[in-house]
Image (spheres, helix red, strand yellow):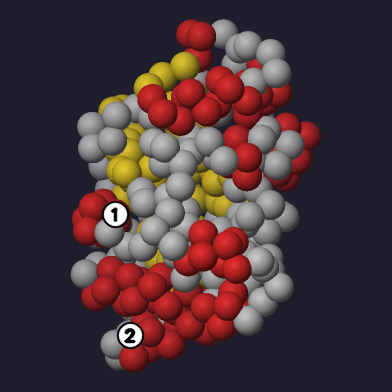
Amino acid sequence: MSDGAISITPLYSGSSGNAILVSSGETKILIDAGMSCKKLVEALTSVQTNPYDLTAILITHDHSDHISALDVFTRKFSIPIYATQQTWRGIHACEKKPHSPALDNEIVPDKYIEIGGMKVVAFSTPHDAQGSCGYRLETSRFTTAVATDIANMTPEVYDHLLGCDGILLEANYDKDMLWNGPYPYYLKQRIAGAGGHLCNDDCAAAAASLCKNGTKHFILGHLSQENNLPQVAERTVLRALENENLSRNTDFTLAVANRYVPTMPLILE
């Protein structure tokens, strides 16, 4: 794969842990490092990627399902890490042992940087973690983005997703499953609130709008184990796209990221 092609492989995705591999040529970028170092190495190895060959790690925010593998993984493989200033505070607070400060890079939202053969920009996301962000990654030919842990589709988030060829987009919960489910009321409020997660309906509306504006490939990610089902999320988003007279596998492709094992890669070429 070369000449600006991009491969997006969710290694695992959900409230139990998140990690996404985005590759273009020799550039291999890991977005988030949840679960454990062992699980992360196993997932990378299963998709024929040596952890030592990673170009960089991008962290979206400091919640454990996005950084729990980072402490051990960083000390073992010494891969440069990028995160916002506020996220770095959280990362350092969770470290059991320090890693080399030479690996630490601060990323500023809305400021493009170059990592290997890709241009990368972070964008702020509405979530209850200070410095929370998503990422847009561009080559000479294609653009992709990862947007999870977003309470709602803000204009800023939408603008950074607009024009992407392929997107991993959060479809965290089904409203009926959340409000009729076993969670305590305060937790339901948190998930559905201003610092929570994106529901299936809002994900579907965003996907339909983005598809009409050129995005052709969608991966639904970060599904709740208790408040969603892959088939429910997929059905909700599919309905919204079809209501716009858009046809699956003609106007768009749609996949759901697996919770515990790598998902078939989306290849833009």
Going by the image, does 183 lie left or right of 151? right
Q: Give the vertical position of 110 relative to 114 (above or below).
A: below
Q: Give the vertical position of 264 relative to 42 (above or below).
A: below
Residue 187 image offset from top left, x and y in percent: 59, 61
- Asked if residue 129 shows in the view, the reply is yes
Q: Quick one: label 1, few (<14), some, or many (20+) residues within 10 Å?
A: many
Residue 157's tag is 1
Going by the image, does 66 lie left or right of 210? right
Classify mark 1: helix, strand or loop.
helix
Q: Check disc 2 and report the residue beneath it.
A: 246
Q: Amino acid at mark 2?
A: Leu
* Mark 1 touches mark 2? (CB < 8 Å): no
Nearest the viewer among 223 and 210 is 223
Classify mark 2: helix, strand or loop.
loop
- Asked if residue 30 shows in the view, the reply is no
Residue 51 placement: quadrant: top right
Residue visible at 70% across and 18% down in the picture: 96
